[in-house]
Image: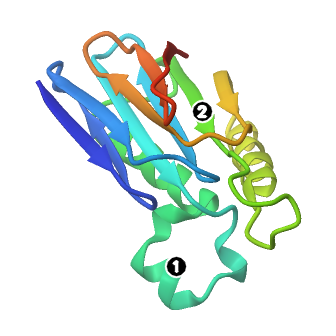
Amino acid sequence: MADLKISPGEYIVSDDPRDTLKTAPLGSSLGLAFICHGKLMAGLLHLGLANSSSAHKRNVNEIPALYADKGIPMILDELRSYGWNEELELEIKIAGGAKILPTNSIFNFSDQLIEETKRILASLNLYCSAEDLGGSVNRVLSVEVETGDVTVSSSMGEVWQL
């Protein structure tokens, strides 16, 4: 069994039942788990910012999947390359979006990231079946390819199913 870890701005898709996909710790960033029912496949995306339009072009070109408006279409394309299509059920679970810094910090952008992510998914007729958002604790999102089980583990040592 391989633990495959992704950092902010990365995504991964696997159809190997031995794999477990994991995000790096999610502070204000978001992790999205994609589980394809009817086909043994799962994906994981680690978003950091809502929209690439206000970002420096070099940053967008270097790590496009960091941005919700780029990363979501990218992982959907990757899922398609593994055999997913709109006729197969795609379950999405989301975690993160914590407010780690003081509430008046200019670096608190988690609400905007959550809203933009959900808006983009809805525009594609995709919706989250479960979420663990907000709060003030770092967490890691994991998905087991074989079972589609999604777990969240907190920096406080707690682990729960999503």
Give the residue furthest to the front: 156
**Pointer 2 local density, CA inside 10 Å: few below 14, some 14–19, many at least 20:** many
**Pointer 1 local density, CA inside 10 Å: few below 14, some 14–19, many at least 20:** some
Residue 144 place in picture, x, y as percent: 31, 20
Residue 2 versus residue 83: which sits nearer the camera? 2
Q: Please name the residue that numbered disc 1 is placed on.
A: 60
Image position of 160 with respect to 108: above or below: above
Callout 2 touching callout 1 (CB < 8 Å): no
Q: Secondary structure at mark 2?
A: strand
Is residue 126 something one can see in this rendering? no
Residue 49 place in picture, x, y as percent: 64, 63
Residue 10 place in picture, x, y as percent: 38, 57
Q: Which amino acid type is shown beneath numbered disc 2?
A: Ile
> Residue 42, located in which quarter of the rendered image?
top left
Q: Please name the residue that numbered disc 2 is placed on.
A: 94
Give the residue displayed 25% in from the left and 14% down from the top: 146
Give the residue furthest to the right: 104
Give the residue displayed 41% in from the left and 21% down from the top: 36
- Quarter of the image for the N terminus: give it: top left
Q: Which amino acid type is shown beneath numbered disc 1?
A: Val
Residue 112 place in picture, x, y as percent: 80, 56
Q: How is the image coloured?
A: rainbow
